[in-house]
Amino acid sequence: MPKKKIETTTSLEELKIQLATIKLNIRSGIEKNTNAHKKTKVQIAQLLTQTK
């Protein structure tokens, strides 16, 4: 059986807030600067290309 991709429907504003929160956590030292923000950036880009 193929795996189904689960898509969460989040708005652009929610994703921007989530990205800002991740960046603040990295700057304050709560979260290490791994690629934590990369997934959110990809979701924002996909959402922007879908709406055009």
Image (tube, helix red, strand yellow):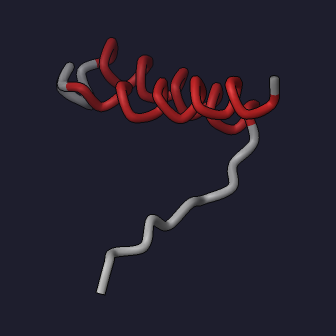
View extreme (top): residue: 27
Q: Measuring from the top left, give residue 35's x and y in whole percent.
A: 24, 26
Residue toward you, 8 or 49: 49
Q: Quadrant of the N terminus?
A: bottom left
Instruction: Count up the numbered dots.
Output: 0
Residue at 52 percent across and 26 percent down: it is 19
Residue toward you, 49 or 43: 49
Q: Quadrant of the C terminus?
A: top right
Q: Measuring from the top left, give residue 26's x and y in whole percent.
A: 31, 20
Q: Measuring from the top left, give residue 28's x and y in whole percent.
A: 32, 17
Residue at 24 percent across and 21 percent down: it is 29
Residue at 53 percent across and 35 percent down: it is 43
Using the rendered view, name the quadrant where residue 15 is placed.
Answer: top right
Residue toward you, 6 or 50: 50
30 relative to 7 in the view: left or right = left
Using the rendered view, name the quadrant where residue 31 is placed.
Answer: top left
Q: Measuring from the top left, give residue 7's x and y in whole percent.
A: 56, 60
View extreme (right): residue: 52
38 relative to 15 in the view: left or right = left
Image: 35 above or below 28: below
View extreme (front): residue: 1
48 relative to 38 in the view: left or right = right
